[in-house]
Image (cartoon, rainbow, N blue to C red):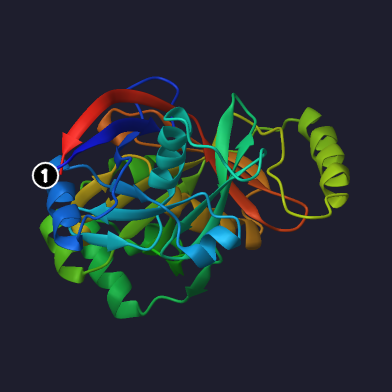
Amino acid sequence: MKQRPFTQVDVFTAQPYLGNPVAVVLDGAGLDVETMQQFARWTQLSETTFVMPPTEAAQAQGADYRVRIFTPGGELPFAGHPTLGTAHAWREAGGKAQHPDRVVQECGVGLVQIQRADPLGAWAFAAPTLQRHDVLADALQAVCGALGLDSARVLRAQHLDNGPQWLGLLLDTPTTVMSLSPDHAALKKTGIKVGVAALHEAQPKPALIGRANREAMAFAKTSHHSNPPEEIDLEAALEVRAFAAAIGIPEDPVTGSLNASLAQWLIAEGLLPARYTASQGAALGREGRIYIAQDARGQVWVGGQSVTCIKGHVYL
């Protein structure tokens, strides 16, 4: 066993213990899959990550490090809050990026850009490409039954896949979202991870129109790569919950990959603006805030603040 630097980071919050924690082993070199999986089960967090040197091919394309992401139930090709939390821990530990304005992470879905983005000193990742398709009636019925949800309250449903796969349900009100009390054993039997969301009642904010126009003009001039817009409305427009009993997590506090795919879906459907804030975690006593911004090139960025809660070493 080897002593390895270890950090636990709370993501999508600036106040410790109100977001979603991720365990980060900052030196994962030489660890086999069984050891990483065993440690991820031991932490009992929704995700545990292991940082390694990038592969030669990825480094040539700008990758600063490689990360492997494990839940208690298996490895993920990509996940949102572990991406932001790992980048935070890597930078804090002295990691030096190839490019001064961004970090490039290598993971199962390929290379993911992470950049500083306002508001409040947040960092944001570029959401991977989304694939989505309609939901079969039988699958929807089974999930609604496990959620204890009247299917009449489901406004729209889609299978969402940006690495992790989710069944996304847009419900009628935030009250419906918050009142759900799922049968997690029944959800596990479906084998489906479920993300539920509802729109908060829109509040008119005329000043944001001017901001959006200025941002659109600025980002239309970007020549070499996309950047996250600088301003965003901090009042939550979307209430979100994530149920992942299928991979051993009854409810995830704050979920980057789900919010990424919900944003790509609901912005494309014209149900949400290109810039908004989502709220997640209240049902678990958390106060997660996810900042969503679609830039002038159509790239969706998913941002949030991160704060270190634990630093030390782990023996692996």
- Callout 1: SS: loop
Residue depicted at 31% across the width and 48% down the height: 50
Looking at the image, residue 224 sits to the left or right of residue 272; the answer is: right
Q: List the residue tagged with mark 1.
A: 1
Task: Provide residue 188's location: percent of width, then percent of height.
Answer: 16, 63
Q: Which image quarter holds the N terminus?
A: top left
Question: Does 260 sit above or below residue 157?
Answer: above
Q: Position of residue 172 (x, y in %)?
A: 45, 51
Disc count in the image? 1
Residue at image point 72% right, 52% down: 226
Residue 117, by quadrant, is: top right
**Amino acid marked by disc 1:** Met
Q: Residue at x 68, y 43 (%)?
A: 228
Horizontal side of 177 relative to 299 (left or right) equals left
The quarter of the displayed image where residue 267 is located:
bottom right
Q: Nearer the viewer, residue 60 or 49?
A: 60
Residue 127 visible in the picture: no
Relative to 45, is 90 on the left or the right? right
Q: Quadrant of residue 86?
A: top left
Q: Is residue 47 visible?
A: yes
Q: Is residue 307 left or right of residue 298?
A: left
Taking depth in this image into account, of 208 and 294 the one nearest to the observer is 294
Q: Percent x, y for residue 163?
A: 42, 65
Residue farthest toward the top in the current orientation of the protein: 15
Q: In the rendered view of the protein, which quadrant contains the C terminus?
A: top left
- Mark 1 nearby-residue class (10 Å; few <14, some 14–19, many ≥20): few
Which x, y percent locates residue 298?
71, 58
Q: Please tell me which residue lies in front, 199 or 77.
A: 77
- State whether residue 137 is above or below residue 125: below
